[in-house]
Amino acid sequence: MAENQQAAGTENQNQPQFALQRIYVKDLSFESPNAPLVFQEQWKPQVNLDLNTAHNKISDNQYEVVLSLTVTAKVGEKVAYIVEIQQAGVFMVSGIEGPQLGQMLGAYCPTILFPYAREAIDGIVNKGSFPALMLAPVNFDAIYAQALKRKQEEAAGEVKEEQTH
């Protein structure tokens, strides 16, 4: 019986594990360089979203994942506002290696963080006296796949370049 419990304990240690440990705002900035004059304009903004993800290893099984978003809203040629946020999280990941770990940190974790960043952006835009901004969902799996493909193409290009010299 004790042997079965011991074997089960060893089995659990080798099982893939994932846990969200903390979510936090690492950095937040709001600028409205043309206020109050921009409030007199008809509100038909062009909104641009730039996003980036990064991660770093904190300890053996802990990773910090940072989702950086920059939202720029313009009315005509005037910048109405710029919001920059770094929404971060600490994730415990064990038993997951290689490409699966990359997918987890590059796509799955940012998917978890995005709604928090979206809510923070909406709140700060409202406090700036602008209409609500609800960003559309983002497909981080597709973005991660594109980035991976681009890296592979760049690596293949570098190999070809070395062979021609």
Image (cartoon, rainbow, N blue to C red):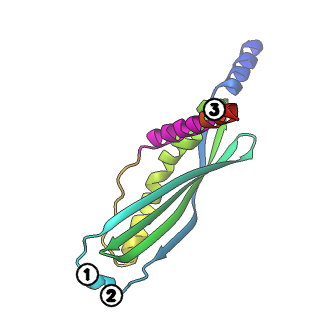
* Residue at the outermost bottom position: 36
- Is 145 a magenta residue? yes
* Residue 93 position within the rendered picture, expressed as x and y whole percent measured from the top left: 65, 38
Residue identifier under label 1:
41
The local secondary structure at tag 2 comes to helix
What mark, if any, has residue 160 been given in the picture? 3
Magenta part of the protein: which range? Answer: 139-155
The C terminus - image quarter: top right
Indicate which label's residue lies in the foreground, 1 or 3.
Answer: 3
The N terminus - image quarter: top right
Q: Is residue 47 left or right of residue 93?
A: left
What mark, if any, has residue 37 been given in the picture? 2
Three-letter amino acid code at disc 2? Leu
Three-letter amino acid code at disc 3? Lys
* Residue 112 position within the rendered picture, expressed as x and y whole percent measured from the top left: 49, 47
Mark 1–mark 2 distance (CA, rounded to whole Å): 7 Å
